[in-house]
Image (cartoon, rainbow, N blue to C red):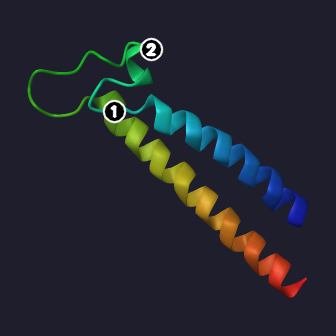
Amino acid sequence: MQIVFSVLLILASVVLMMLVLLHKGRGGGLSDLFGGGVTSSLGGSSIAERNLDRITVGVGIIWFACIIGLGLLLKTG
């Protein structure tokens, strides 16, 4: 079980790093490289940006759950 949490934690960490780098910052960010620099002039964020936010939060929750799970496994084991 510990190996499963460890592998999942590594995968979630890599995916989370990539998702954070894709986010648009003040200067544009890496999302401009993949066509994410085009935003709507209506003042709101685009659908792609909102979906990227949701995916990032979901992967962050998985990452956090892996940290807690590994901590509990190592504490009792």
Question: Is 44 on the left-hand or right-hand side of 18?
Answer: left
**Sequence order check, earlier mark of 2 and 1:** 2
State the residue at coordinates (38%, 12%): 35
- The answer to whether residue 22 shows anywhere in this view is yes
Furthest-front residue in this view: 27
State the residue at coordinates (35%, 28%): 48
State the residue at coordinates (56%, 33%): 18
Question: Is 60 located above or below residue 54 in the figure?
Answer: below
Callout 1, which amino acid? Glu
CA separation in Å, label 2 and label 1: 12 Å
Q: Position of residue 15 (x, y in %)?
A: 62, 39
Secondary structure found at label 2: loop
- The answer to whether residue 1 shows anywhere in this view is no
Tag on residue 34? 2
* Quadrant including the N terminus: bottom right
> Quick one: 57 or 31, which is closer to the camera?
31
Question: Is 59 located above or below residue 17 in the figure?
Answer: below
Tag on residue 30? none
Q: Residues within 10 Å of mark 2 (few under 14, many from 20)?
A: few
Residue 51 falls in which quadrant of the image?
Answer: top left
Tag on residue 49? 1
Q: Position of residue 55 (x, y in %)?
A: 48, 43
Question: Is 8 on the left-hand or right-hand side of 1?
Answer: left
Residue 52 falls in which quadrant of the image?
Answer: top left
Marks 2 and 1 in Cβ contact (< 8 Å): no
State the residue at coordinates (33%, 32%): 49
Question: Is 39 located above or below residue 74 in the figure?
Answer: above
Q: Residues within 10 Å of mark 1 (few under 14, many from 20)?
A: some
Secondary structure found at label 1: helix
Question: Is 23 located above or below residue 57 in the figure?
Answer: above
Callout 2, which amino acid? Phe
* Quadrant including the C terminus: bottom right
